[in-house]
Amino acid sequence: MYHFETNVQELKHKVLREIAKSCFNGTLEEDYQIIPKLIVPGPKPTMRCCIYHERAIVRKRMKLALGGNPDIDNVVEVIKIACDECPLGGYQVTNRCRGCIAHRCEKACHKNAIHFDPRTRSAYIDKDACVNCGMCAKACQYNAIQNNIRPCVQACKVKAISMDEDDAATIDDEKCVQCGACVYQCPFGAIMDKSYIKEAIAILKDSDFSKEYPVYAIVAPSISVQFKDVSLGQVVSGIEALGFAHVVEAALGADMVAYKEAKELAEKGFLTSSCCPTFVSYIKKNFPQFEKDISTNLSPQATIAKWIREHHPEAKIMFIGPCIAKKKEIQLENVAPYVDVVLTFEELQALLDARNIDVPSLPEGELDHASYYGRIFARSGGLSDAVKEALAEQKCPFEAKPLFADGLDNCRLALIKAKSPNRDFNFIEGMGCIGGCIGGPCSLTHEVRDKGEIDKYGKTATAPSIEGAILDYTQGQ
């Protein structure tokens, strides 16, 4: 089994693995009550106050592993009973307070929220009066007043997370862009993405039984840095062992996108990328004045899926990657006809373990070869490099002047700069995750953010050019 970075990731894996086992065996109904006891064997709790609390949370995780609450449109949900350990947040007086007589904190507060314990002379804050302006913290010479920001709130760059009446996190779906930062950052695993692993297994089982349609796996290029101690070829063989008839690189879709996006940039003169669904959603919700400038191209996963669907209409198609936003993207009207299910790398690992597939013992499988430029889409700046190359291959005299931004804070800065009439760039490549897709929230490892690792993988491509990769694949199919 894979060695996970955190216990939260491992617990999520255990739930997905057991659900997957039951779905493959057709015993989900019988196993539903047993699974919590397998994951939290009694009698002593390992993470919570008691085994009953732990098992109750596992049941909530199981519900999310089976698609979550159908009344919630978001693909990210909060497990309220697991969100009970973080401090309330806001400014708090710590034990560094010396009970001084200067009372600078009191003088700085314009809401009369600072009071003093007559016995210890220490300050305390009336939370009903406090507006979290932070003036008291700036005034304190002992740094005794600290702002306790919950990890999920700190991670959310679009201010979509607040606390409800029970002090549990709640997500404003109108603001949320499904970046998944809260999912990765919550230290209690109280925020999770919905899984559609049950639907994926049903497709694989039906395909194996009826033999009427092939199942395609479209894998994100960031898969090249995900699995430790095994080669990418062995991972491909593992995916095939699950029942997939074909494993295709999303990087081939990236090649197609780069070629089209280069043309569109030359025609319009200014463009923002459309490859990252989080970035597209961020523009629409926070910078609507740039919505007209978003590339009209589908993302790489949707582009290659569309090509497969048009040439193999009987096929079932799944995307496998590090991204939660892709689960939302395939609900869009212009993408839904092409992709049936999105799986994350975490879910792929759960499927492999559920089937007891020993990946290190497998022979080398082979991916359809994208170009170097399609493969480096996995890291920040890769799309920009690909657009420049595509312009050169098409002998287009237009000069691309890209500004690439990774992480929503940097995306925000890039879009603010774009408002200036004196901007010195004509293309914004935006990616919601730090480092690009290699920093995706459902990556198996978040240690690899070095673009050199992806570039090394890109250099193994045999296609001589972007156009060559597109022709090799489309003509060979």
Image: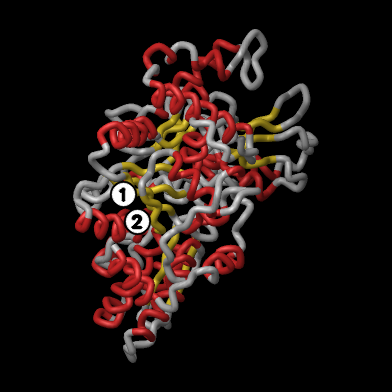
Q: Earlier in the sequence, mark 1 or mark 2?
A: 2
* Crowding at mark 2 (Cα within 10 Å: few <14, some 14-19, many 20+): many
Query: Relative to 403, is 40 above or below?
Result: above
What kind of element bears circle 2? helix
Q: Is residue 77 left or right of residue 449?
A: left
Q: Residue furthest bottom?
A: 397
Above/below status of 47 relative to 241: above
- Residue situated in front as seen by the camera: 186 or 332: 332
Q: Considering only vertical position in the picture, is 293 above or below 357?
A: below
Secondary structure category for the residue under label 1: helix
Residue type beneath disc 2: Gln
Per the image, the residue denoted by label 1 is 329
Residue placed under numbered mark 2 in the picture: 301
Which quadrant of the rendered structure holds the C terminus?
A: bottom left
In the figure, is residue 122 to the left or right of 296? Answer: right
Quadrant in the picture for residue 211: top left
Labelled disc at residue 71: none
Give the colouring mode of the picture. Answer: secondary structure
Residue beneath the point at 53% across and 36% down = 357
Callout 1 touching callout 2 (CB < 8 Å): yes
Residue at the (35%, 61%) spot, across then down: 300
> Which is nearer the eye, 126 or 152?
152
Q: In 3D space, how far apart are the residues under numbered discs 1 and 2 (Cα atoms)?
A: 10 Å
Residue 82 percent coordinates (x, y): 52, 24
Give the residue at x 35% y 67%: 273
Left or right placement of residue 201 versus residue 228 in this view: left
